[in-house]
Image (cartoon, rainbow, N blue to C red):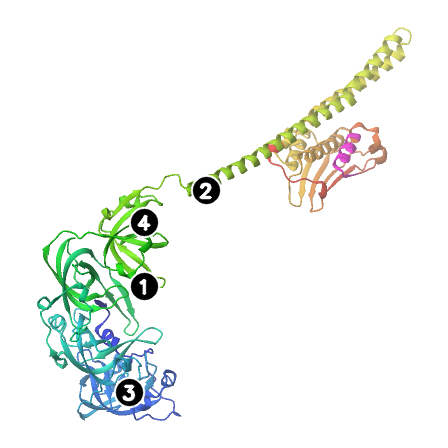
């Protein structure tokens, strides 16, 4: 395992006395009593310690890192106390801090602060007053250490070192060790180790003396026990470690069988054939106590002998082949499935054939009895999930869903091509997971461990559901489209029919009637041409006027069929264009203005308003002889208004003009009636004419697109 961070931070990992505050209170509250015994500090809560009680204590130094000048623990014969390292810029002013060593008798002035697990002391003055004997170490059970009540106490433990690792920085000499004592595991630390010490203590029975520390998380709650064991020379070896490969060989079935002389804390040696080798990946764990990051890499071997199967965990890279015969020595551990060996060393001693997998039926697939066994089973593939370190197959056997994993170093393209729903035969090592809920995992060795028994058809129920959904959507869209097109054609046909009827009425009321009148006048001329020339001439003049009127009405009917101006622009633009054309090369001026927010109206209504405006403009120019014509379009939420004013000669009478004597104004009245609007005409001789048409908003339609406008 490797660590990241400075050596000082890593040493502090073992101690509950790490403070959460960075700087102590230099001035204690004047109303707090001075604490002169460590037991009084230990009686404080974290919140009380944060108040900054003044401290003056005398005690013996039981631990101090003389290289890093940090991690000071003192003991007064009854209790231990952690003393925080002063800030760098104040160490010199503290006193004898840099010259301390275990066994010094010191006097410390300072104040309490909030610690990582319990209140700490921030010193303001330290004075060495001599040497003192180390306190008598206490013998505590692991369960007592876990209470936290003995934090920083001076204790003695005996156990077996099962694992060691360096602090991780190149200039550090700190060594950590997992020490198995009678009922637990203690993490010990010494600060002056060498590279050779990392291996020479594994599986040695030792006695250690030091201060208890606490391993805690970011919530301040205890997660384990540590021990500051001082120096390498302070480790007392009770039994040296044996050569791991000279240990008596045990069958795998007897790793945890009864033995009156057995000891589970020591290494045992097994031999077996490799059924799988799995290279682990770094697992990072944040240690809040030290603010350091520990990286664990656990590689796994699975071995099989004639009696059973076993999982071997090791830090060594499992550079083995399937079928290799391997000797492994490690520390036994209990799991929900089969016993395993941890912190093992191994060596390849021969070659054999790969063991035959055990066939597992789907109804008996979930059981701890298969743990660590090489098995073969059929299952239905649900999905394949690749990731950077492995390829995960999600499968179902019977009613149990599980996963099988293949390391990413293998080419698994063929596995990716297997369709979901296929029945596959899997060969791999079974790993029982106790849960909850209980499950298991298969470790695949190679892509060949996955064999397709029955491929899933391409056309699945899911594909059918998707296709039905697509067809239903297409049918719905098609039906909507058909209804839309049919409605549009119906409206277009009705519009054409209405227009034909309108044109028929127009022709009947204008052209046909005009021609009939002309025919009558011509017959009158024919009958009186010789007998009454004057009457014939009068009839001929009437016929000429009627012909002129018929031409005008025919021209107006043709113009009503389609307005090119409205195709190119909106109503205001069309009025402006026609006004400009009609006043071209004349002395008259026409101005078009818009009030409010311009909006498009129903195409028919825009057409009628355009014709009304054009009629008013024609009357002003032709009959009123106006020089100034103003056309104003006003849009309000309630109505649309067209106002045309001129400075011409005016009409003889507004009532008579709108009553029907003038053919053009009669057409204006009819158009206003079709629009459901109101017509106002105000005129007097010599004062011009004012024409107003107002259309209520409730009768207006929504704006039409240019495509719809072109259909009218």
N-terminal label among 3 and 4: 3
Q: Residues within 10 Å of mark 2 (few under 14, many from 20)?
A: few
Q: CA distance from mark 1 to mark 4?
A: 21 Å
Q: Which mark is residue 358?
A: none
Instruction: For residue 640, say whether it is visible.
Output: no
Q: CA distance from mark 3 to mark 1?
A: 53 Å
Q: Residues within 10 Å of mark 4 (few under 14, many from 20)?
A: many
- State if disc 4 and disc 1 touch (CB < 8 Å): no
- Residue 644 located within the stretch drawn in magenta: no
Q: Quadrant of the C terminus?
A: top right
- Residue 245 rendering spot, x and y as whole percentages: 9, 66
Q: Residues within 10 Å of mark 3 (few under 14, many from 20)?
A: many
Instruction: Say if 36 sits above or below 466 in the image.
Output: below
SS for tag 4?
strand
Q: CA distance from mark 2 to mark 3?
A: 77 Å
- Residue 632 rendering spot, x and y as whole percentages: 70, 40
| Residue at the disc numbered 3 | 124
Region in magenta:
666-679
Q: Which mark is residue 379?
A: 4
N-terminal label among 2 and 4: 4
Q: Nearer the viewer, mark 3 or mark 1?
A: 1
Q: CA distance from mark 1 to mark 2?
A: 38 Å
Judge left or right: residue 146 versus residue 193. right
| Residue at the disc numbered 2 | 465
Instruction: Say if 362 sits above or below 211 in the image.
Output: above
- State if disc 3 and disc 2 touch (CB < 8 Å): no
- State if disc 2 and disc 1 touch (CB < 8 Å): no
């Amino acid at each position: 395992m490797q660590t990241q961070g400075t050596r000082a931070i890593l040493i502090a990992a073992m101690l509950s006395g790490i403070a959460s505050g960075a700087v102590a209170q230099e001035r204690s509250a004047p109303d707090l009593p001075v604490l002169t015994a460590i037991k009084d500090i230990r009686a404080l809560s974290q919140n009380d310690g944060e108040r900054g009680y003044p401290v003056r204590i005398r005690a013996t130094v039981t631990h101090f890192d003389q290289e890093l000048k940090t991690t000071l623990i003192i003991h007064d014969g009854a209790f231990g106390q952690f003393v925080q390292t002063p800030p760098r810029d104040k160490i010199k002013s503290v006193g004898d801090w840099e010259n301390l060593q275990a066994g010094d008798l010191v006097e410390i002035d300072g104040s309490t602060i909030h610690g990582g697990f319990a209140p700490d002391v921030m010193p303001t003055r330290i004075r060495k007053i001599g040497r003192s004997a180390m306190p008598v170490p206490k013998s505590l059970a692991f369960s007592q250490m876990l209470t936290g009540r003995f934090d920083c106490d001076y204790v003695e433990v005996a156990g077996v070192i099962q694992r060691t690792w360096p602090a991780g920085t190149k200039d550090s000499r700190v060594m950590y060790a997992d020490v198995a004592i009678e009922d637990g595991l203690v993490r010990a630390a010494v600060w002056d180790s060498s590279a050779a010490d990392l291996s020479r203590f594994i599986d040695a029975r030792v006695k250690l003396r030091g201060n208890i520390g606490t391993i805690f998380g970011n919530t301040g709650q205890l997660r384990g026990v540590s021990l500051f064991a001082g120096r390498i020379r302070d480790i007392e070896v009770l039994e040296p470690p044996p050569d791991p490969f000279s240990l008596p060989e045990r069958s795998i079935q007897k790793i945890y069988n009864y033995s009156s002389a057995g000891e589970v804390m020591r290494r045992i040696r097994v031999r077996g054939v490799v059924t799988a080798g799995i290279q682990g990946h770094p697992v990072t764990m944040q240690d809040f106590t030290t603010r350091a990051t520990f990286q664990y890499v656990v590689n796994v071997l699975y071995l099989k002998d004639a009696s059973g199967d076993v999982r071997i965990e090791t830090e060594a890279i499992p550079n083995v082949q399937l079928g290799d015969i391997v000797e492994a020595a490690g520390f036994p551990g209990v799991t929900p499935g089969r016993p395993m060996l941890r912190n093992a060393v191994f060596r390849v001693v021969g070659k054999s054939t790969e063991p035959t997998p055990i066939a597992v039926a789907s109804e008996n697939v979930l059981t701890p009895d298969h743990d660590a066994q090489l098995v073969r089973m059929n299952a239905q593939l649900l999905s394949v999930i690749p990731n950077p370190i492995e390829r995960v197959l999600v499968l179902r056997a019977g009613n149990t869903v599980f996963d099988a994993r293949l390391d990413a170093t293998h080419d698994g393209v063929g596995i990716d091509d297997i369709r979901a729903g296929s029945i596959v035969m899997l060969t791999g090592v079974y790993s029982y997971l106790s849960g909850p809920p209980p499950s298991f995992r298969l470790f695949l060795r190679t892509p060949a461990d996955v064999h397709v028994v029955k491929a899933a058809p391409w056309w699945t129920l899911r594909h059918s559901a998707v296709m039905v959904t697509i067809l239903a959507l297409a049918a719905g869209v098609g039906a909507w489209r058909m209804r839309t097109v049919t409605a549009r054609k119906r409206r277009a046909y009705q519009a054409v029919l209405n227009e034909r009827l309108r044109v028929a009425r127009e022709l009947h009321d204008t052209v046909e009637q005009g021609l009939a009148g002309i025919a009558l006048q011509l017959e009158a001329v024919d009958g009186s041409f010789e007998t009454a020339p004057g009457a014939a001439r009068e009839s001929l003049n009437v016929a000429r006027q009627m012909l002129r009127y018929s031409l005008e009405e025919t021209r107006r009917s043709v113009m009503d069929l389609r307005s090119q101006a409205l195709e190119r622009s909106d109503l205001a633009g069309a009025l402006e264009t026609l006004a400009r054309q009609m006043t071209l090369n004349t002395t008259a001026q026409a101005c078009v203005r818009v009030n409010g927010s311009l909006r498009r109206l129903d195409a028919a209504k825009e057409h009628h308003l355009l014709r009304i405006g054009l009629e008013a403009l024609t009357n002003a120019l032709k009959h009123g002889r106006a020089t100034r014509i103003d056309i104003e379009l006003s849009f309000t939420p309630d109505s649309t208004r067209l106002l045309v004013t001129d400075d011409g000669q005016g009409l003889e009478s507004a009532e008579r003009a709108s009553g029907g004597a003038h053919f053009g104004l009669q057409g204006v009245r009819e158009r206003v009636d079709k629009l459901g609007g109101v017509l106002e005409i105000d005129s007097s001789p010599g004062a011009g004419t004012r024409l107003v048409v107002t259309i209520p908003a409730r009768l207006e339609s929504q704006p039409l697109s240019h495509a719809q406008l072109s259909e009218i």
